[in-house]
Amino acid sequence: MTLYELCQRDVICISTGANLGKVDDLSFDENTACIENLVLYGRLKLFGLLGREEDTLIPWKDIRKIGSDVILVETKTIVPVRKKKFLFMI
């Protein structure tokens, strides 16, 4: 399976049945090169003009099944990640 194929799948929380979104990225441990988290980017605010909501990290150990069209996760530790804000000088 490639990262592209993984990003085509919806992430579904088993306990609530909520669709958390699609996988946008993965985070790796620098020392062991093991996958640590699935990263789901936050939703756009006002068509992206006001930025995005916080990203969500889902620990790799919380994945229960990767199916042909969904990824089932059982997690209570959905961690929002604050993005760094950049100031642009014009």
Image (tube, rainbow, N blue to C red):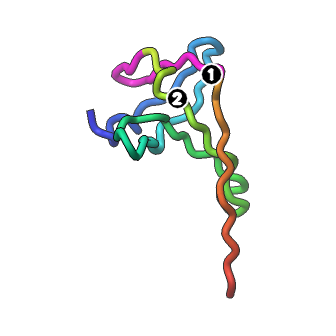
Residue 62's disc is none
Q: Quadrant of the N terminus?
A: top left
Instruction: Tell me which numbered mark, 1 or 2, is placed earlier along the sequence.
Output: 1
Q: Residue furthest top?
A: 15
What is the span of residues highlighted in magenta in the rendered image?
65-76
Residue 18's tag is 1
Say how many tags the image has. Answer: 2
Indicate yes or no whether the magenta region holds residue 4: no
* Left or right for 10, reference 78: left
When asked about the image quadrant of residue 75, the answer is: top right
Which of these two is toward me, 25 or 61? 61
Quarter that holds the C terminus = bottom right
Callout 2: SS? strand
Residue 25, percent from left and from top: 45, 44
**Label 2 sits on what residue type?**
Pro
Where residue 87 sits in the image (x, y, percent)? 70, 74
Estimate the x, y position of residue 53 in percent, counting from the top left.
69, 48
Residue 67 on the magenta segment: yes
Name the residue carrying label 2.
59
The residues tagged by marks 1 and 2 sit, at their Cα atoms, a distance apart of 17 Å
Indicate whether 18 appears above or below 81. Answer: above
Query: Compared to 50, does 62 lie above or below?
Result: above
The secondary element bearing badge 1 is classed as: loop
Crowd around label 1: few <14 · some 14–19 · many ≥20 (10 Å): few
Coordinates of residue 80 in the picture (x, y in percent):
67, 39
Which residue is located at x 40 percent, y 46 percent?
A: 30
Label 2: how many residues lie within 10 Å, few (<14), some (14-19) or many (20+)? some
